[in-house]
Image: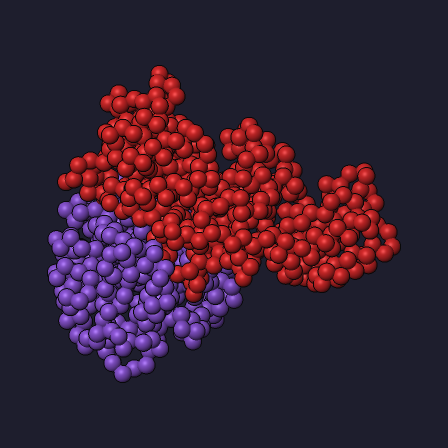
Chain colours: A purple, B red
Amino acid sequence: MAASLKVGVAGLGTVGTTLVAQVVRRHEVLAARCGRAIEVTAVCARSRNKDRGVDLKKMKWFADPVELARDPGIDVFVELMGGAGDPAKRAVEAALSSGKSVVTANKALLAKHGVKLATLAERNRVALNFEAAAVAAVPIVKTLREGLSGNAVHRIYGILNGTCNYILSRMEHERMPFAECLKEAQRLGYAEADPTFDIEGHDTAQKLAILASLAFGTRVEQSAIYVEGISSITPADLMAADELGYRVKLLGVAVKTPKGIEQRVHPTMLRKDSPIAQVMGVTNAATIDAEGLDPLTLVGPGAGGMATASAVLSDIADIARGQTGAPFGRPIARLAAVRKAPMQRHEGGYYIRMLARDKPGTAATIATRLAEQEISLESIVQRPHLGEEGGEAKARSVPVILVTYATTEDAVRKALAAVGRDRVISGRPQVIRIEKN
Amino acid sequence: MAASLKVGVAGLGTVGTTLVAQVVRRHEVLAARCGRAIEVTAVCARSRNKDRGVDLKKMKWFADPVELARDPGIDVFVELMGGAGDPAKRAVEAALSSGKSVVTANKALLAKHGVKLATLAERNRVALNFEAAAVAAVPIVKTLREGLSGNAVHRIYGILNGTCNYILSRMEHERMPFAECLKEAQRLGYAEADPTFDIEGHDTAQKLAILASLAFGTRVEQSAIYVEGISSITPADLMAADELGYRVKLLGVAVKTPKGIEQRVHPTMLRKDSPIAQVMGVTNAATIDAEGLDPLTLVGPGAGGMATASAVLSDIADIARGQTGAPFGRPIARLAAVRKAPMQRHEGGYYIRMLARDKPGTAATIATRLAEQEISLESIVQRPHLGEEGGEAKARSVPVILVTYATTEDAVRKALAAVGRDRVISGRPQVIRIEKN
C-alpha cells in the first residue's frame, strides 16, 4: 500500500474537530477505499489549551496557519478558518505554492478569490477541492464537475441557505411574521446573532457564484450576482402563494439566456409540485437542468458540523485516490468571463401584492399602467384576508394580488413606479419573481 | 495535451447512438474538462447497414463485440448490449483481460457477475465504471463510491424503476386499476410488451444489488434480495394510503440491521412528506441515510437514451481524467460476504387490508389472532368505500384496514394465516410494508 496521505487541518471549530475524529474512527475503511491511509498529522487553531473532545497529542501544533500550510510534513492543507481575507487566503496560497493540495469549506474565499487560487493550484499541479463550500454533504460540486461532463447545463437553482428556508417554512406553517421566526431561528441556533449575511442573501450568493462557475465554465464572479433577501416577505405573501399553487423560497438561480448568464438571489415563487418547493426546514436542495435531460435534484443537509466534515473528508479521499481534476472543472484559460445578463432584462412571471386605496378608479389606473408596459395578467385576486397584516393606517386599503404572464423586470419596475406616482396604493408594492420548474 | 482517449462502443441502440453523437458534439468541452480528447474510434452492432442518424464512417466496424473488446486501437470498451450472459459477459471479460477499462450500463451483468468482473478489473488495474447501470443520469454510484467516503451508510432506499412509478402514479391520480395503467404505460413506451421484469421488481432488484454493494462494502448478491412486484396493488390501497398520510411506491431498500443486511424490493407505504414519496411519474429517486447526517436524496431521470448516455459519458470522462477507483469502492478482498437478514425477521409497521365477512364475531376473531402474535394496532379503519373494487361475491364483506405498530414479518404472516383458517375474511389479505423516513 502507498504511503499514507498526511493532512494538516487549520481551524478546529465544530467542523475541524468532527473531521479529526472521523479520520481516526474511519481509518480502516478510508484506507481500503482510497488505497492508502489518511492521517491528520498537524493542526492549527487559536487556542491550544481548549478541550475539544478529540485527542490532538500525536499531532504537530502550529500557532500560525501559514506555517502549517508550508510544513513539509503534510500533503494536504485543510482550511476551515473561514473568511475571504487573511489568514485564510495567505495560508491557502502558501499551501498551493509549496505544492500541497488544498481542501476548503470557505465559500467567501472562493467566491472572491476562486480564480486566483485555482490558477495557483493549476500551476502547481495540485488539487483545490471545495465540496463543503457549496451545499456541504450534498455532492453538487462533484456532480457538476464530474457527473455531468457530457451535457451542457442550462440552469441551476436551489435552496442554498438553511436559515432562510427554516424561517420561510416556519412563517408559512405557523403564519408567524418574519421577525418572530428569525428570533426562533436564532434561539435554536439556526441563525447567527447578526443574521444579515444569511437573510439578505449574501451566503446564497457566494455559493451560487461557485456553482455557476462549475455549471457554465465561467470565472467565479460574485459581483455579477443580483441579490435580494427575505426580510420583506410577509405571511400574507406565503398565504397568497399557497392559494395560487406556489411556495416562496429564497433561491440562488444561475441561468443561460440569449442575453448572457443571469445570476440572481431573491425570494422566488415556485410551483408547489416542483421537487425543491417541497424542501422544508434547514434542508438544502439544488436542481440542475441540462440539455436533453429531465431535471436532476439533490436534496440534503447543507450545513452543520458532520455534513461539512463529511464533504471535506470526501474531498480528501479523492486526493488520496489521486483524483486531481481542475478546481472549476476545466483549465483556468478555458473559463470564460461572465457575460452578465442585466437584471432589468430578466424575463419571467411576477407576483405583485399591493394595498390599493379603496376608491373609484383605482383598479382602472393600475390596469392602465400595466397595459402601458404591455404586461398581461394571469390572475388578479382582491380579497380582504390576503392583506391581514395591515394596520389602522391601511384600514381603507384593499390588498390586490396580481400574477403576470412572462414580462420583463424593467416593465414591472416602470409600471409600479407609475402606479406609485398615481397615488392609488399605500406603501411599497411587494414583488416576487416566479421561477418555472 | 495527452493523447486522446479511444473508445469502442458495442451496441448501437438509442443509448449507443446518443453517446456517439454526444462525444462528437461535446468534443471540445470534453477535451477541456478531461485534459485530453475523447473519440469513438470503433463500434460494433448487429446490423451494419441500418441508418442510425449518426456518422459512423470514420469508425472501425466490428461484427463481433469480443473482437472489438480486444482491439489494440481502443483504450476503453463501452458495453451497451445488455444481458447477463454472452456476448456481453465475454466481451467485457476480454476487454478487462486485455488491459482496457470498461464502461457499462448493464445492470443484469453486474448484478450477476459484478464481483468476478471487478476482480478482473482490479487484477488488470483498469476501471470498471457503471453509473448508467443504476439510476442512469442520477449520480448515485459516484455519490456512494466517492462522495460519502467518510460516513458509514445505514440505509439506502429508492424508486429505481420508472415503469412501476409511472403505473402507481397514474393509478393514484386517476383511480384506475393496475391492468389499465399498465396498458397505458405500454402504449406510451414506458413499459415493455412483456412487462414482467419491471413490474415484478426484478429490474429494481438488480439495481439494488449494485447499490447495496457500494453502500455497505459487501459482495454484489442479487440472490440475497427479497422481491415482490406491484401487480397486486389496487386503487383501494392507494386511496387508503392517501387517507392514512402515506403513498405507495415500489422501493428497493437495503438496510443494516443487527441481524445482517436486509435487501428487499416490494410495494412500500411511505409518509407523504418524505422526499421520495413526492416523486411521481417515470422519475427515479434514492435516499441515503448515513451516520450523523440528515438524509441525502437524489431525484432525476433514471432511464432513457440521453440520461443513460450522459451517465456513460461521465464514466468515460472519469477514465480520461485518470480516475480509476475500485469498481465497488474498495478492493475485492475487502468486500464482505452479505450476511443476509431473513425476511421473516424484518421489523416494521404493516398496512393490512382484508375483506371481513359481515357477521358477528369477525372483528373479535381478527383482533384475537393479531393479539396472539403480539401485534399492536396504530389504526383500524372500516369503511365501505375503501374496498370499492369488490364485486357481487364480496357483497356481504366489509373492507377493513389495519395499520400495525412495529412488529415482525413472521408475526404478521402467522396472524394472517390464522385469520384465514378462521374463515372470517374473503380472499387474500393485502399486506404492504411501511418504510419510515
In the current view of this chain or complex, which residue is farthest to the top?
Answer: B49
Q: Say whether residue A155 is visible.
A: no
Q: Position of residue A76 (x, y in %)?
A: 22, 62
A168 or A156: nearer the eye? A156
Looking at the image, which residue is at 33% across and 78% down? A52
Q: Quadrant of residue B363?
A: bottom right
Q: Quadrant of the N terminus of chain A?
A: bottom left
A361 or A222: nearer the eye? A222
Looking at the image, which residue is at 55% across and 49% down? B264
Position of B437 compared to B359: left or right? left
Q: Position of residue A376 (x, y in %)?
A: 41, 43
Position of residue B21 relative to residue A109, above or below, is: above
Position of residue B53 relative to residue A300, above or below, is: above
Looking at the image, which residue is at 12% across and 62% down? A98
Q: Position of residue A215 (x, y in %)?
A: 28, 47
Position of A298 compared to B202: left or right? left
Looking at the image, which residue is at 36% across and 64% down? A26
Position of residue B265 relative to residue A77, above or below, is: above
Q: Quadrant of residue A133?
A: bottom left
In the current view of this chain or complex, which residue is farthest to the bottom?
Answer: A49
A420 or B27: nearer the eye? B27
Q: Position of residue B367 (x, y in %)?
A: 77, 59
Position of residue B259 relative to residue B211, above or below, is: below
A157 or B131: nearer the eye? B131
Q: Say whether residue B299 is visible.
A: yes
